[in-house]
């Protein structure tokens, strides 16, 4: 099925909701002006639609395959599309010019990534991980390391990976056992096995720059004793050319439910030698800090996967619902396209409304990150940084959960055909399901939100956000029904926040117990906040006859639907948030079954 | 992963919630007494756990395969397990003794089917479809047809199928085109292609008795012109032995996302002849009525699939959560099993509570069907029949949706391992997803509930049910918090019902628009009703020291969790139910994308 980048809505959100016009005026982003950005997005859409989207299905069917020599062959077409991606320079979009990037805001890179995720989530994981390695180098690398690795990572000729997980260290990164021993020349020798390494081995890039967490001798236990190392697949010669093969090999690929095109590798470091050659990046025992730099960007990127795949699945469902005729709608004398049935239309409107709300949340998060770098005053930058910190777990978890739910609705629209693999709806459903798991499970995101983000600035960050939502309520005074629903919803957030904040100091288990329903509530309410803003902006543009009237009317209808019909479903989550945590532990594990 | 039939909870629901003790006293079920029934369930559990459950994974991996000659080979072990199923006589459990069955209530057969679904949903589809064919023969067959087909269907030596769907006739059965021409000998010749035929061809039974919907010459269009035919794979000789091969062949098998073990066939009827030999069952043009007899049982059975697979997935998650250690729970000085983390425990409690609520709804539905046959007075039988009619779409849709949601939570508990196929969690997630689709999509169920079931007896049936829930509220007076939540929830049902009933006569689109959220609301509230009854019953048994105290305390905790934390989430659905249907149609289809 074809994918069409939703450029009108993307530009609407950029323009009318998250303030791209302000961001492109900020000094770090002088390279970007609105016209250039919108032109780049049009171009990206063409590339993504024509080159990347058509490979989604074959990527699923054939998957990446490990060969006997440990090399990995990606699905037909992946390599060629990647070469074109490199040639067009898409990899460097959101990287500062001082490092050789295009100097565009992360916001613009995020829009391009939404398109890529929608087109082909499995393929897009390769540039996504490369971006993480770039982030680590920019923030923690020495000038020499930056000079050695950044240029080819920026073009995408080399790709990157993140190596955290080991068999006994998943969510609990601190339990990892991979060891790094110092060598005489200042480099390190890495020994250990990492699992779930996305694009750990593949044939699309000339070199792979692995970012590997490991323990140095005598390091303290847990996360405080972890350092980060650069471990290139091929060592880099002094002249920058690709040199000797390093002792890092793909031992096997996982057999996964989805994202078959993306090779998920078990990686052996130093199995055939004293250790793979690695270079410490950042300070010893500061690896988790560096990794968090990468993870925050990656978490936003995974939320963006939820958005992208939701939109792809939705578009396919809309087409199917117009083509498939079954039964007669009320008042019709002949067979109706199923889109005329209210229940089908409800599924489509639900998908559309959640997608547009997710788009606002994801773009707003990226815009906060841009403002945290580019805003004029230190206060504005700090405030934006805090909001980005608060938004990141919501972007990741709320949008990845909704990605699965929207993909499920899209499958349902197809009826029996949805369960047949040839239709493609099932692939979206399978692919989407990884996003709530990796880059920190959604449970971990909820814990991060409640334990680390609510207490930011003694609660002033969430309090300020609640005030912002109340401003949106005020702006909806002319739509009293919608204003009232958003008010009830933000009241619920305030109640829940107060309960969690009160629990945090002395009863953290109580706060942990409410974390997941709280994240869902807050995500849904922030979606309502942005949909309310979208509604007001669209009304104003429509009144001024400024823009595509059909699009603006659709936006008003979709935002109204969200506020009127979806938002109220979240309010009942408060009961779960404030319930005593003992209720979760009332049953001994051995009595849970039987 | 092993499966353990939850016999304690099954017996609790039978005993304390749905009144098996009353049902076994009814004349049609004299063969069953409580001791016999409970003994049979223990025996069924052993068979299912030992013989059927271990085949679930290999069934997924290898799947059913069509051979060049059109025959189908089921996965290794399926045939042997089926042979044992036949030998043990499990197929005939809920069939009246007059037809050669064991004369047990459907309720008991439903419990056995829950176990089978949990153990191996793909395998269990074969006996499930056979049961549908048995139902059709019992209710609509002539004595000769019953004598010819029932004995071997009852043992399971022959299996059955339902043939409704054609490429252009899915939800819209009335659009089907398969034709039946009369032959000189009173039989018919069937020509056409059916799709999505579960166990349409396989190697587990000696013969396959297809129940096929087709049109006779001159029949009226739509569902009023459809007749039902028996089309055996092998014609049956006068002495009852298996005779000549009929012209019905499997043209291909679908490549599905899940239930790989179950062959889903495209069936060609009469491709190589004047038509496959068929025998009309019931009257001409009355096929839909007959098919509804089969569908109602099948819809309850599909809801039971949601329950079964949810329980299987849950059990696996509980085991994993006890074995997997990650991080430290609050107050712990060493690595904790993840079950000690509140967020994981919330997932497990949510699964457990929904499963136990589903079990009540499914068993109650089966019990209503039994009472509709066996109750003493015509009033009681009619009332039970109406309640079964009202419950059936809820059993099907609410439980199949929850089956997917519980399987998703179970996958999430596994973290990254959940996305790897070897773990098994992904299979449950994939398998469960068909249940909201087949036997009438869940949207169709919601429409059935609102359009046909709410108006039963001018609304007295739903009104009576609401009164029953209010009685449960009263019985919870000693738990005022829980009583209050159930009261708010049933108030929401009453509001929503009044709105829908008022819309039905003149504005059916308005009722249709609210159907799906209404079904979800009513299902959740009925779950709360039964969990409230369970709580009261468990308290009373615990006070009397009558039964396993640990189990009863767990039941009280689970029911409290459901009423306190899950039930309130449904109340916000009212907003969607009462919203104007125009909100769904505000956007022209061509503006839905972009």
Image: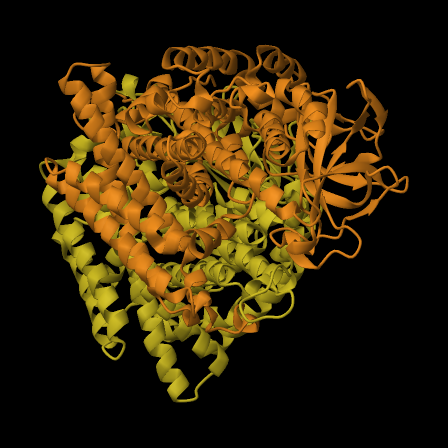
Chain colours: A yellow, B orange
Count of labels shown?
A: 0
Residue A397's place in the image compared with B552, above or below, is below
In the image, is A293 to the left or to the right of B550? Answer: right
Who is closer to the viewer here, A48 or A118? Answer: A118
In the image, is A562 to the left or to the right of A56? Answer: left
Name the quadrant containing residue A467: bottom left
Which residue is most to the bottom?
Answer: A544
Name the quadrant containing residue B471: top left
Residue A237 in view in this figure: no
Name the quadrant containing residue A525: bottom left
Please give the name of the residue rendered at 45% of the width and 66% of the height, measured from the top-left corner: B508
Residue A311's place in the image compared with B462, above or below, is below
Residue A14's place in the image compared with B396, above or below, is below
Residue A223's place in the image compared with A363, above or below, is above
In the image, is B70 to the left or to the right of A355? Answer: right
Which residue is most to the right?
Answer: B273
Who is closer to the viewer here, A577 or A561? Answer: A561
Residue A525 in view in this figure: yes
User: Could you say where residue A323 lies in the image, as x and y percent from the top left?
Assistant: 65, 63
User: Could you say where residue B588 lies in the image, as x and y percent from the top left?
Assistant: 53, 74
Please give the name of the residue rendered at 46% of the width and 72% of the height, measured from the top-left corner: A11
User: Could you say where residue B136 lies in the image, as x and y percent from the top left?
Assistant: 62, 35
In the image, is B289 to the left or to the right of B43? Answer: right
User: Could you say where residue B172 lies in the image, as x and y percent from the top left?
Assistant: 62, 54
């Amino acid at each position: 099925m074809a994918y069409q980048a939703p450029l009108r809505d993307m530009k609407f959100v950029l323009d009318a909701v998250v303030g791209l016009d302000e961001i492109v005026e900020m000094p770090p982003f002088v390279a970007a002006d609105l016209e250039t950005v919108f032109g780049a997005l049009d171009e990206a859409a063409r590339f993504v639609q024509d080159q990347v989207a058509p490979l989604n299905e074959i990527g699923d069917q054939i998957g990446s395959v490990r060969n006997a020599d440990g090399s990995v062959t990606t699905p037909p077409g992946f390599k060629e599309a990647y070469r074109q991606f490199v040639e067009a320079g898409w990899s460097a979009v959101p990287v500062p010019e001082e490092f050789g990037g295009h100097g565009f805001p992360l916001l613009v890179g995020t829009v391009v990534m939404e398109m890529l995720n929608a087109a082909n989530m499995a393929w897009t994981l390769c540039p996504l991980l490369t971006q993480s390695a770039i982030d680590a180098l920019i923030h923690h690398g020495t000038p020499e390391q930056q000079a050695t690795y950044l240029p080819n990572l920026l073009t995408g000729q080399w790709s990157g990976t993140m190596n955290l997980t080991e068999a006994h260290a998943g969510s609990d990164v601190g339990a990892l056992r991979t060891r790094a021993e110092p060598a005489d020349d200042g480099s390190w020798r890495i020994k250990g096995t990492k699992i779930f390494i996305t694009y750990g081995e593949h044939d699309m890039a000339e070199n792979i720059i692995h970012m590997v967490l490991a323990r140095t001798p005598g390091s303290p236990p847990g996360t405080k004793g972890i350092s980060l190392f650069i471990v290139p697949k091929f060592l880099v010669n002094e002249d920058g050319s690709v040199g000797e093969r390093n002792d890092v090999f793909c031992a096997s690929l996982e057999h996964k439910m989805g994202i078959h095109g993306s090779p998920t590798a078990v990686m052996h470091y130093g199995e055939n030698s004293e250790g793979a050659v690695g270079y410490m990046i950042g300070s010893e025992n500061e690896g988790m800090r560096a990794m968090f730099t990468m993870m925050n960007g990656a978490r936003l990127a995974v939320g963006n996967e939820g958005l992208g795949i939701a939109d792809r699945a939705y578009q396919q469902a809309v087409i199917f619902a117009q083509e498939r005729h079954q039964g007669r709608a009320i008042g019709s004398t002949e067979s109706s396209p199923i889109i005329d049935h209210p229940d089908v239309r409800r599924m489509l409107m639900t998908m559309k409304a959640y997608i547009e709300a997710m788009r606002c949340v994801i773009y707003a998060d990226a815009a906060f990150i841009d403002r945290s770098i580019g805003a004029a005053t230190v206060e504005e930058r700090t405030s934006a940084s805090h909001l980005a910190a608060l938004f990141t777990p919501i972007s990741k978890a709320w949008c990845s959960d909704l990605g699965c739910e929207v993909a499920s609705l899209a499958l349902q629209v197809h009826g029996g055909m949805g369960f047949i693999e040839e239709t493609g709806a099932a692939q979206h459903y399978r692919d989407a399901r990884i996003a709530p798991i990796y880059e920190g499970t959604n449970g971990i995101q909820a814990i991060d939100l409640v334990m680390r983000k609510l207490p930011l600035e003694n609660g002033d960050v969430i309090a300020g956000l609640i005030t912002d939502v109340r401003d949106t309520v005020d702006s909806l005074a002319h739509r009293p029904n919608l204003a009232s629903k958003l008010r009830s919803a933000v009241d619920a957030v305030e109640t829940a926040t107060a309960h969690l904040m009160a629990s945090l100091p002395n009863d953290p288990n109580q706060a942990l117990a409410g974390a997941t329903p709280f994240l869902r509530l807050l995500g849904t309410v922030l979606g309502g906040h942005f949909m309310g803003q979208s509604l007001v902006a669209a009304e104003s543009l429509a009144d001024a006859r400024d823009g595509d009237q059909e699009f603006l009317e659709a936006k008003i209808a979709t935002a109204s639907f969200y506020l009127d019909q979806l938002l109220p479903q979240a309010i009942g989550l408060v009961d779960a948030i404030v319930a005593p945590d003992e209720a979760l532990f009332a049953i001994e594990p051995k009595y849970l079954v039987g």
